[in-house]
Image (cartoon, rainbow, N blue to C red):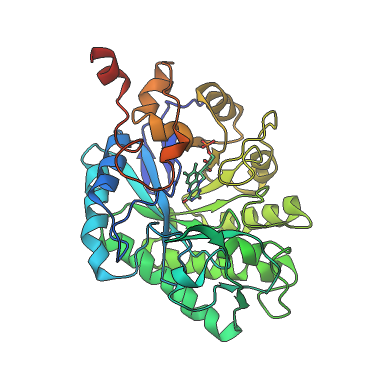
Amino acid sequence: MAHLFTPKKVGAYTLSHRVVLAPMTRLRTIQPGDIPSPMMADFYGQRASEGGLEIIEGVSISIVARSYLGAASFYHDGQVEGWKAIANAVHAKGGRVFMQLIHGGRQSHVEMTGGVDPVAPSVVPFEGVALTKDGFVPASPHRALDIEEIPGIIEEFRVAAQRALDAGFDGVELHGANGYLVDQFIQDGTNKRADAYGGPIENRVRFLREAVEALISVWGADRVGVRISPSGEWGGISDSNPEATFSYVAKVLNDYKIAYLHVIEPRIKGDETLHEGHAPVAVKYLRPHFTGPIIAAGGFDGASAEAIVASGDADLVAFGRHFTSNPDLPYRVKHKLPLTPYVRAGFWGGDEKHYTDFPTYEAAATA
Ligand SMILES: Cc1cc2nc3c(=O)[nH]c(=O)nc-3n(C[C@H](O)[C@H](O)[C@H](O)COP(=O)(O)O)c2cc1C
């Protein structure tokens, strides 16, 4: 029977364990220019482990794609050295690192998009937020993309994927979750288009397909992953039949033979609201449609992670919040050691405090 510490082949790589770092936006780039900071390299280096996989926080593919001041992005050459330092820090410890690529779509504000209206598949009333120098503010009104504009965004995904390759990463993950642009196209609550990108599910996944194909053109399918959140509500997202929609998405992605499918479970509705008592369900209905590795995420601890891998519903488990405060999380899970509680105050923005100052178990024990 598989468990968290048996090796697993994920696309082009054989991982030595299945405790994955979930992508987490921590708002610690250097302004102006969104330059990845040295403390980001420290953060990812600290959490790297021999044969382990880390997925870097959502990296915006363009200025218009940005949602949050201080969030990661990769759209100009001045950012290359910072990203190389991050990849090097993970590789120095024998880890693998994928970069999550994101377009925020309507979850943005004119101050973040460079002065233009945020874009979306359709105009649908939205009460979400963006983060500017004035803090969290209501998102600006968005506009629907013209069909002629779509190839340009797909090309931005391809260019960002190429940048990740040039910076020494091991692969890329398409952010198709949490109500950002790709998800806005997939789900019918936000996609009201009447053209080839809207209507039936075959059309609503067209944007996803084209983005995936762009990433594959750079990396090959075995170095590309996709993240989805079939039950998420973050970003005002909704679908009239999530199970049918995402089963179809899983089938489509299965045909591409991508490295993995990364699924956020319904216990996490948005980026952090825990709905206690909800067992993982999405991986169960997706499993028959996706034969490659599935990473489950959302509200796991060591015991529940072991259980889902043993059940076969998922092959790996991504941890978010616990990884923020436990740089040696795989070690602690393996040896059933107590976890340091996470500190929400340090999640979004700030300096090293509550970011890179959490000791390993051994360091704390010998201090
Ligand atoms: C501070 C913070 C930032 C996050 N940023 C991202 C992100 O950039 N991309 C993403 O797909 N999910 C993001 N998430 C969601 C996490 O990847 C993860 O799915 C969620 O925290 C549930 O897992 P957990 O219960 O192990 O924390 C974020 C969550 C937190 C707490």
Q: Residue at x 23, y 15 (%)?
A: 367
- Residue 310 coordinates in the image, percent (x, y): 56, 25
- Residue 137 coordinates in the image, percent (x, y): 54, 60
Describe residue 66's horizontal placement relative to residue 118 as left or right.
left
Q: State whether residue 81 appears in this view.
A: yes
- Residue 147 coordinates in the image, percent (x, y): 60, 83
- Residue 320 coordinates in the image, percent (x, y): 47, 38
For the residue pair 283 and 299, the one nearer the viewer reads as 299
Say which quarter of the image contains residue 45. Answer: top left
Q: Which residue in the rendered view is the most extreme toward the front?
A: 134
Q: Residue at x 39, y 31 (%)?
A: 325
Query: Is 289 above or below relative to 180?
Result: above
For the residue pair 242 and 36, the one nearer the viewer reads as 36
Describe residue 296's horizontal placement relative to residue 354 as left or right.
right
Q: State whether residue 18 appears in this view.
A: no
Describe residue 229's horizontal placement relative to residue 351 as left or right.
right
Q: Residue at x 59, y 32 (%)?
A: 312
For the residue pair 348 and 287, the one nearer the viewer reads as 348
Q: Residue at x 58, y 44 (%)?
A: 264
Say which quarter of the image contains residue 70. Answer: bottom left
Say which quarter of the image contains residue 201. Answer: bottom right
Q: Which residue in the rendered view is the most extreme toward the top?
A: 366
